[in-house]
Amino acid sequence: MDALTTPILEVKDLHVAYGKVEALHGVNLKVGAGQIVTVIGPNGAGKSTMLNAIADALPTTGTMRGSVSLLGEDVASVPVEARVARGMCLVPEKRELFSTMTVEDNLLLGSYRRYRAREKNYADQLDVVFELFPRLKERRKQDAGTLSGGERQMLAVGRALMAKPQLLMLDEPSLGLAPRIVKEIFHIIVRLKETGVAILLVEQNARAALQVADYAYVLETGSVGLEGPASQLANDSKVIDTYLGLAKKAA
Ligand SMILES: Nc1ncnc2c1ncn2[C@@H]1O[C@H](COP(=O)(O)OP(=O)(O)OP(=O)(O)O)[C@@H](O)[C@H]1O
């Protein structure tokens, strides 16, 4: 990352505890403009906790300290809705959709919730989302409950995009999806980056994530064990033995 450029996101010395369980202890991370940054690591390492802390979406039992800056501004005391209005969006691992509403209404509701009454015309952004996800366009009048797993994931990402984020955070977008669909979704993530959206991608599918990312962090039991350019980590013997082998078996 260019040292002179203010990162879109900067996390410093992030600690999170759930009661006596310390889930994160001292995580530092940066996402630059136009970058895909991935965080890989085993189950329970603290990846979702990290995203939730950044987005102000921790469960009430979670407490955090450390700083989270969006475009150089500390957002530690800024609530989730205001963080979204400033350009930060999280697509959580659990895809929250309204099953008995159409694809289009899910998208519009997403934007309404995020923008409130500040911006009334969403048609342009709907077109942007449909251009990225032709499958959603074809199914725009279909209830979300009738979608496949992959389409539901696309809709969850599309809903976040209705808020025109500068930083999109994705929690395991490949979870439970067939390799073909994972490929399709990751291709869209790269296209999104090309449109100027910075992406923080949490993934257990390290192989797929390292292929698209510019920079990578390996989170191990609550702290960063390793970091570097994604292409470098993809050739690191520890990463290959520990994560890429597993991803291969899982694929
Ligand atoms: N609400 C909670 N209350 C108590 N402990 C929690 C809570 N959520 C997570 N934890 C604990 O915090 C640690 C980190 O969990 P987290 O879900 O962030 O890991 P993860 O890396 O996202 O795992 P996975 O890849 O399995 O989703 C784990 O030890 C987990 O058991």
Image: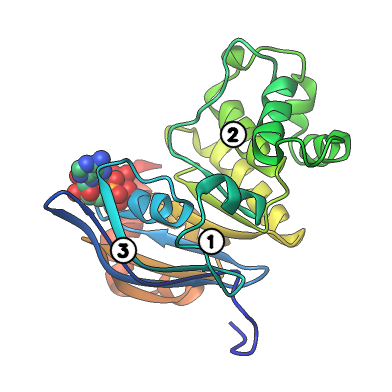
Disc number at residue 219?
3
Q: Is mark 3 within 8 Å of ligand 1?
A: yes
Q: Is mark 1 on a helix, strand or loop?
A: helix
The quadrant the C terminus occupies is top left
* 104, 237: nearer the viewer: 104
Between disc 2 and disc 3, whose residue precedes?
Answer: 2
Mark 2 = which residue? Answer: 156
| Label 2 C-beta lies within 8 Å of the nearest ligand 1 atom | no
The number of callouts visible is 3
165 left or right, relative to 77? right
**Residue type highlighted by circle 1:** Gln
Three-letter amino acid code of the residue under disc 3 = Leu
Q: Is residue 86 left or right of residue 223?
A: right
The answer for how far apart the CA atoms under marks 1 and 3 are is: 18 Å
| Front position in the image: 16 or 243 | 16
Q: Do the residues labelled 2 and 1 touch (CB within 8 Å)?
A: no
On the image, the x and y values in percent for residue 235 come to 41, 73
User: Element under label 3?
Assistant: strand
According to the picture, the residue beneath numbered tag 1 turns out to be 211
Q: Tell whether label 3 touches label 1 (CB within 8 Å).
A: no
Q: Which mark is residue 150?
A: none
Which mark is in front, 1 or 3?
3
The residue depicted at 74 percent of the width and 61 percent of the height is 194
Calculate the distance from the C-alpha at mark 2 to the C-alpha at mark 3.
Answer: 25 Å
Residue found at the very far left of the displayed protein:
20
In the image, what residue type sits under mark 2? Ala
In the image, is 111 to the left or to the right of 46?
right
Residue 247 percent location from the top left of the image: 36, 50
Measured in 3D between alpha carbons, the distance from the residue under mark 2 to the one under mark 1, in whole angstroms, is 22 Å
Can residue 43 be seen by looking at this rendering?
no
| Residue at x 52% of width, y 25% of height | 149
Q: What percent of the width, then of the height, locates residue 130?
A: 79, 34
